[in-house]
Protein backbone atom coordinates (compact mmCIF):
# COMPACT_ATOMS: atom_id res chain seq x y z
CA UNK A 1 0.00 0.00 0.00
CA UNK A 2 0.84 3.65 0.02
CA UNK A 3 2.73 5.48 2.74
CA UNK A 4 0.76 6.63 5.76
CA UNK A 5 0.06 10.34 6.20
CA UNK A 6 -0.45 11.83 9.64
CA UNK A 7 -3.18 14.43 9.95
CA UNK A 8 -1.43 16.14 12.88
CA UNK A 9 1.25 17.96 10.89
CA UNK A 10 2.61 18.55 7.43
CA UNK A 11 5.71 16.46 8.04
CA UNK A 12 6.23 12.94 6.73
CA UNK A 13 5.85 10.53 9.65
CA UNK A 14 5.71 7.41 7.48
CA UNK A 15 9.48 6.86 7.73
CA UNK A 16 11.16 6.16 11.03
CA UNK A 17 14.92 5.67 11.23
CA UNK A 18 17.34 4.37 13.79
CA UNK A 19 20.75 5.88 14.39
CA UNK A 20 23.64 4.55 12.27
CA UNK A 21 25.46 1.55 13.71
CA UNK A 22 28.90 0.34 12.68
CA UNK A 23 29.46 -3.26 11.60
CA UNK A 24 33.09 -4.20 11.07
CA UNK A 25 32.34 -6.95 8.52
CA UNK A 26 34.58 -9.57 10.07
CA UNK A 27 33.54 -13.24 9.83
CA UNK A 28 33.04 -13.49 13.59
CA UNK A 29 30.82 -10.34 13.77
CA UNK A 30 27.57 -12.28 13.52
CA UNK A 31 25.11 -9.78 15.00
CA UNK A 32 24.18 -6.14 14.71
CA UNK A 33 22.28 -4.93 17.77
CA UNK A 34 20.43 -1.61 17.87
CA UNK A 35 18.64 -1.64 21.24
CA UNK A 36 16.76 1.59 20.58
CA UNK A 37 13.19 2.79 20.17
CA UNK A 38 11.71 4.00 16.89
CA UNK A 39 8.30 5.67 16.93
CA UNK A 40 5.79 5.65 14.07
CA UNK A 41 2.06 6.06 13.53
CA UNK A 42 -0.52 3.44 12.55
CA UNK A 43 -3.93 4.13 11.00
CA UNK A 44 -7.11 3.60 13.03
CA UNK A 45 -8.73 0.15 12.93
CA UNK A 46 -11.41 1.31 10.47
CA UNK A 47 -8.72 2.22 7.91
CA UNK A 48 -6.73 -1.01 8.34
CA UNK A 49 -6.03 -2.92 5.11
CA UNK A 50 -4.64 -6.47 4.82
CA UNK A 51 -1.59 -5.41 2.79
CA UNK A 52 -0.34 -2.81 5.27
CA UNK A 53 3.03 -3.79 6.66
CA UNK A 54 6.15 -2.63 8.41
CA UNK A 55 9.07 -2.36 6.01
CA UNK A 56 12.62 -2.64 7.31
CA UNK A 57 15.73 -1.78 5.30
CA UNK A 58 19.36 -2.32 6.21
CA UNK A 59 21.30 0.50 4.58
CA UNK A 60 25.04 0.68 3.98
CA UNK A 61 25.91 4.33 4.53
CA UNK A 62 28.06 6.41 2.22
CA UNK A 63 31.76 6.21 3.08
CA UNK A 64 35.15 6.52 1.45
CA UNK A 65 34.60 3.02 -0.02
CA UNK A 66 30.94 3.44 -1.05
CA UNK A 67 29.80 6.43 -3.13
CA UNK A 68 26.17 6.54 -1.97
CA UNK A 69 23.82 5.03 0.60
CA UNK A 70 22.48 1.69 -0.61
CA UNK A 71 20.06 -0.90 0.67
CA UNK A 72 21.80 -4.20 1.42
CA UNK A 73 18.93 -6.00 3.19
CA UNK A 74 15.17 -5.76 3.68
CA UNK A 75 12.29 -7.33 5.55
CA UNK A 76 8.53 -6.87 5.75
CA UNK A 77 6.10 -7.79 8.50
CA UNK A 78 2.30 -7.40 8.67
CA UNK A 79 1.10 -4.39 10.64
CA UNK A 80 -2.33 -5.82 11.48
CA UNK A 81 -3.59 -9.20 12.69
CA UNK A 82 -6.60 -11.16 11.42
CA UNK A 83 -9.07 -9.01 13.38
CA UNK A 84 -7.57 -5.75 12.05
CA UNK A 85 -5.85 -5.05 15.36
CA UNK A 86 -2.35 -3.61 15.42
CA UNK A 87 0.05 -6.41 16.26
CA UNK A 88 1.64 -6.10 19.67
CA UNK A 89 4.49 -8.22 21.03
CA UNK A 90 7.88 -9.69 20.13
CA UNK A 91 8.46 -10.89 16.56
CA UNK A 92 11.05 -12.39 14.24
CA UNK A 93 11.10 -12.06 10.46
CA UNK A 94 13.64 -13.08 7.81
CA UNK A 95 15.82 -10.33 6.34
CA UNK A 96 16.70 -10.80 2.69
CA UNK A 97 19.77 -9.58 0.81
CA UNK A 98 19.64 -6.74 -1.68
CA UNK A 99 16.82 -4.30 -2.36
CA UNK A 100 13.07 -4.83 -2.42
CA UNK A 101 12.78 -3.95 -6.10
CA UNK A 102 11.93 -6.97 -8.22
CA UNK A 103 10.13 -8.87 -5.45
CA UNK A 104 6.34 -8.83 -5.36
CA UNK A 105 5.18 -7.80 -1.90
CA UNK A 106 1.53 -8.78 -2.30
CA UNK A 107 0.78 -10.42 1.06
CA UNK A 108 4.44 -11.14 1.69
CA UNK A 109 4.74 -13.62 -1.16
CA UNK A 110 7.93 -11.85 -2.23
CA UNK A 111 9.66 -13.02 0.95
CA UNK A 112 8.42 -16.58 0.48
CA UNK A 113 9.47 -16.60 -3.18
CA UNK A 114 12.95 -15.30 -2.38
CA UNK A 115 13.51 -17.93 0.31
CA UNK A 116 12.21 -20.71 -1.94
CA UNK A 117 14.70 -19.71 -4.63
CA UNK A 118 17.57 -20.36 -2.25
CA UNK A 119 19.09 -19.52 1.08
CA UNK A 120 21.64 -17.30 -0.67
CA UNK A 121 18.89 -14.63 -0.58
CA UNK A 122 18.63 -14.84 3.22
CA UNK A 123 20.77 -12.35 5.17
CA UNK A 124 19.60 -13.33 8.66
CA UNK A 125 16.71 -12.79 11.05
CA UNK A 126 15.38 -9.51 12.37
CA UNK A 127 14.08 -9.55 15.95
CA UNK A 128 11.91 -6.66 17.13
CA UNK A 129 9.19 -5.74 19.58
CA UNK A 130 6.08 -3.67 18.82
CA UNK A 131 4.27 -1.78 21.59
CA UNK A 132 1.09 0.15 20.82
CA UNK A 133 0.53 3.51 22.47
CA UNK A 134 -2.90 5.17 22.20
CA UNK A 135 -3.34 8.88 21.67
CA UNK A 136 -6.18 11.25 20.90
CA UNK A 137 -5.92 14.01 18.29
CA UNK A 138 -8.89 16.29 17.63
CA UNK A 139 -11.18 13.79 19.40
CA UNK A 140 -10.12 10.88 17.17
CA UNK A 141 -8.14 7.95 18.50
CA UNK A 142 -4.86 7.34 16.68
CA UNK A 143 -2.28 4.70 17.44
CA UNK A 144 1.43 5.31 17.79
CA UNK A 145 3.78 2.34 17.57
CA UNK A 146 7.07 1.93 19.37
CA UNK A 147 9.47 -0.41 17.64
CA UNK A 148 12.41 -1.73 19.54
CA UNK A 149 15.11 -3.39 17.43
CA UNK A 150 16.70 -6.01 19.60
CA UNK A 151 19.17 -7.49 17.11
Image: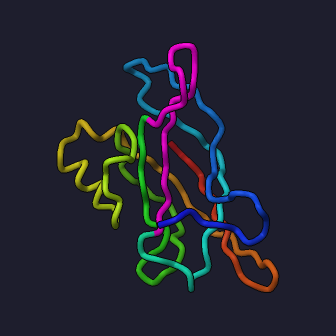
- Using residue 13 as the reference point, say whether residue 94 is left or right of it: left
Q: Name which residue lies at 57% across and 19% down.
A: 63
Please name whichever residue, 142 or 28, is drawn nearer the observer in this view of the structure: 142
Assess whether residue 110 is covered by the magenta stretch. no
Image quarter for residue 28?
top left
Q: Name which residue lies at 79% across and 77% down.
A: 137
- Using residue 113 as the reference point, say whether residue 57 is left or right of it: right
Say if 90 sits above or below 81 in the image: above
Q: Name which residue lies at 25% across and 48% down.
A: 114
Assess whether residue 67 is covered by the magenta stretch. yes
Say if 122 sits above or below 52 in the image: above
Counting from the top left corner in percent of width and height, residue 122 is at 30, 41
Image quarter for residue 14?
bottom right
Counting from the top left corner in percent of width and height, residue 85 is at 52, 79
Say if 90 sits above or below 65 in the image: below
Q: Find the magenta span and give its range.
A: 52-71
Residue furthest to the left in view is 117
Residue furthest to the right in view is 138
Counting from the top left corner in percent of width and height, residue 62 is at 57, 24
- Using residue 139 as the reference point, say whether residue 44 is left or right of it: left
Say if 103 sits above or below 135 in the image: above
Please name whichever residue, 130 or 102, is drawn nearer the observer in this view of the structure: 102
User: Count of labels shown?
Assistant: 0
Q: Name which residue lies at 67% across and 57% down.
A: 39
Residue furthest to the top in view is 64
Counting from the top left corner in percent of width and height, residue 126 is at 44, 47
Amino acid sequence: GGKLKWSGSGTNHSVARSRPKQHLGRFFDTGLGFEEHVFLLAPPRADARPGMSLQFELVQCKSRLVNEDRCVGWAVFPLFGTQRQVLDGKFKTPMLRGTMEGWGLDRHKGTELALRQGLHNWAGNLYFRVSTLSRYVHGNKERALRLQHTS
